[in-house]
Amino acid sequence: MLSRFLTLLQLSTANPAADSQEIVRHITLLILFVVAVVLLFWGKKLLHVILFLFGLTGGLAIAIGTNNFFFHLQGVSLAVYTVVLALTGAVILSFALTFSFFLAGNTLAFFAFNSCKSLLPVSCRETWCLIVFCLLCGILATALKEQAIALFSAFGGSLIILDVLFSLIFQQDALLFLQGGFGILDTATALIALLLLVLLTVVGTMYQLGKIKVRS
């Protein structure tokens, strides 16, 4: 991916009409890949940073959702409202650890369910299944704490890596796989992606918990 990006950069230098959108896409994918690797192998060590980002993202989502449904703010008012809720969520999750683990477990369970929903039996795709799964993952995260954050961060990093690979192989925009999940893949490709997701998650979790050590 890095070599591909450097090639595009050279082309843009030689030819001012080079596709700038393609360059931006590859920069985005490179950043996502770095973030994914950090989450995959060092997520547990960056616990407070991850919780801060979860809170920031959650607060931002709540601000956008409530504004769209209730307040309909615009301009400066919307910007202030969004920033305040985003920072509030970030601060709460950074310091209220028990609540943070529960909410982080719920958040990743939501992403996991949506990504894998197309692989589940039709009877397991109902909203109540999502709610039960999120609650169970939240309780699990609260009970296991460090083990849970290692598992969840490894899973999150693995999902982002799959998204980067999907974008590169199929020449698609970044984050498309995270939005569409396995449902946008054919059956064979989805099974390969699922196996890769499980393998990366297991390796990342075991590494973070000290079960796998790299000799220096």
Image (spheres, grey):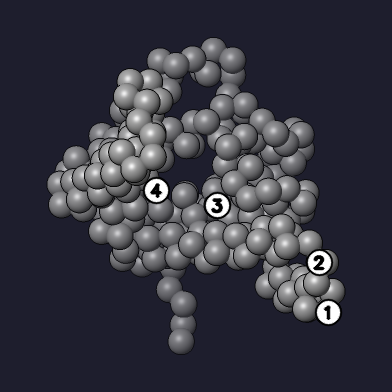
Q: Are marks 1 and 4 in contact (CB under 8 Å)?
A: no
Q: Which residue matches tag 1?
A: 14
Task: Identify whether 138 is placed above or below 16.
Answer: above
* Residue at horizontal 34 percent and vertical 43 percent from the top: 76
Q: Amino acid at mark 3?
A: Ile
Q: Amino acid at mark 2?
A: Ala
Observer-side mark, 2 or 4, equals 2
Q: Which residue matches tag 2?
A: 18
Mark 2 neighbour density, 10 Å: few (under 14) some (14–19) many (20 or more): some
Residue 208: x %, y % from top left: 38, 63
In the image, which disc is placed on residue 152?
4
Q: Which residue matches tag 3?
A: 160
Mark 1 neighbour density, 10 Å: few (under 14) some (14–19) many (20 or more): few
Q: Is tag 3's residue or tag 4's residue first in the polypeptide sequence?
A: 4
Observer-side mark, 3 or 2, equals 2
Dot 3: what SS?
helix
Residue 139: x %, y % from top left: 26, 34
Q: Are marks 1 and 3 in contact (CB under 8 Å)?
A: no
